[in-house]
Amino acid sequence: MRLLTGFHLATMADEGLGIIEDGAVAVEGGRIAWVGRAADAPACRDVIRGEGEWLLPGLIDCHTHLVFAGDRAAEFEQRLAGASYEEIARAGGGILSTMRATRAASEEQLLAESLPRLDGLLAEGVTTVEIKSGYGLEEEAELRQLRVARRLGQLRAVSVVTTLLSAHALPPEYADRRADYVRLVAESILPRAAAQGLADQVDVFADRIAFTNQETAEIFAAARRHGLPVKLHADQLSDQGGAALAAAWGALSADHLERAAPEGLAAMARAGTVAVLLPAAAFTLRETTLPAVTRMRALGLRMAVATDMNPGSAPARSLLLMLPLACSLFGLTVAEALRGITRHAAAALGLHDRGMIAPGLRADFARFRIRRPAELCYWLGHNPCTGRVVAGEPA
Ligand code: DI6
Ligand code: FE
């Protein structure tokens, strides 16, 4: 047994932050064995001694597109000059421009471009990250993206959850054969990804520039046949009834939700679908329509917060920066924002073994040199993380 002591704890294990000042955690076999006040800790010879830092559950970025090639800084400049995200996408830029770069990249190139992005998250205390495909948009390139995601998880001390998002945009080869592409995803790409153990879950971008609810249902049905949980990019650019659709399929999460209808949010609450809020996308696209956080709170929806790290709508390479954005832009409280990147992010991934500091859960932690947890939501662009512990081991 190993003891972590000399920390204040924000366990997330109650309705707030679950604070235990002068706390300690005992770990054994990669799991948490005991949590409490340092004065009551069991005797251990193996001790990790903090310097009065705060210990949080390892952070979880539950929505990223971090495996891709190239960048779209030039499109960013076009948007600053007045072009909209949708106009650029309809003109063949946007996701399709990253598709071209990603298809052209070898597996090694993709890995080399993605690793520094992962390392940036780890330096902030992230111990679990979700990574989507969706820039290959053809069988081999989609599987290559997922293999790179898996390899990232082998190269670093981090849990990687992979998501098949082949229904992210319609590839140009299928421009006048939409149904054929949806069938390719449902009947070939998804089954192969599942058979090779490359996809833990399935996502669809449901939007007027992406896929319809009918097409989404076809892909979700295939996911169900292969035993994979689903989630949805829902109601970001337009209200498509995405929140209700996600709820009807028992989705783990519905993500974005800027334009989600009240009935859809209520359906999510009944279904237990987590609302994943992505403030970097709203910030970058200069959205004035924001997710209905007050309503979500009143409905008792669990709200997670993530980077949406992608080269277009959310070039966000910091999960910590999402905290002040979630608070100041979306109106979350400090406790909501911090639960959003721990406990509720775990729920958005269907992971029941992490996200809190509680007995029986994985011993994944992040250490921060701060005076109080609110500092994490307050500083912009500051990283006070002093280390991570992954499955009980300093990482
Ligand atoms: N919504 C998003 O925020 C990203 N994908 C999606 O469906 C954007 C992806 C990109 O612009 O490359
Ligand atoms: Fe996204």
Image: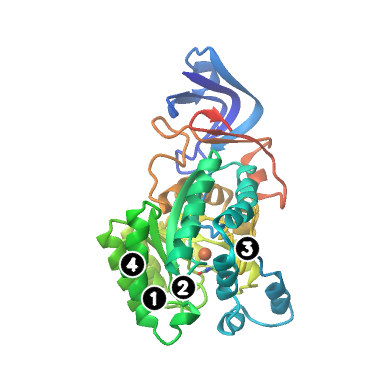
Q: Tell me the residue that label 1 is attached to.
A: 241
Residue at x 38%, y 50% (from the top left corner): 350
Disc with the residue nearer the chain's start (1 vs 3): 1
- At label 4, the amino acid type is Ser
Q: CA distance from mark 3 to mark 4?
A: 41 Å
Closer to the camera, 57 or 171? 171
- Left or right for 249, reference 358: left
Q: Nearer the viewer, residue 78 or 257?
A: 78
Horizontal arrangement in the rendering, residue 14 relative to residue 278 (left or right): left
- Where does label 3 land, which residue? 329
Question: Seen in the image, is 29 located left or right of residue 91?
Answer: left
Residue bearing the label numbered 2: 235
Residue type at numbered disc 3: Leu
Q: Nearer the viewer, mark 2 or mark 3?
A: 2
- Give the spatial CA distance, label 4 vs label 1: 27 Å
| Between discs 2 and 3, the one toward the N terminus | 2
Residue 246 drawn at (x, y percent): 36, 66
Judging by the rendered image, the residue that carries numbered circle 4 is 188
The mark closer to the camera, 4 or 2, is: 4
Question: Within the displayed image, which quadrant is ligand 1 positioned in?
Answer: bottom right
Q: Tell me if mark 2 has few (under 14), some (14-19) or many (20+) residues whose alpha carbon lies within 10 angstroms of its own.
A: many
Q: Position of residue 24 (x, y in %)?
A: 53, 24
Label 2 near ligand 1 (CB < 8 Å):
no
What's the residue at 58%, 67% (across, down)? 104
Q: Earlier in the sequence, mark 2 or mark 1?
A: 2
- The answer for how far apart the CA atoms under marks 4 and 2 are is 27 Å
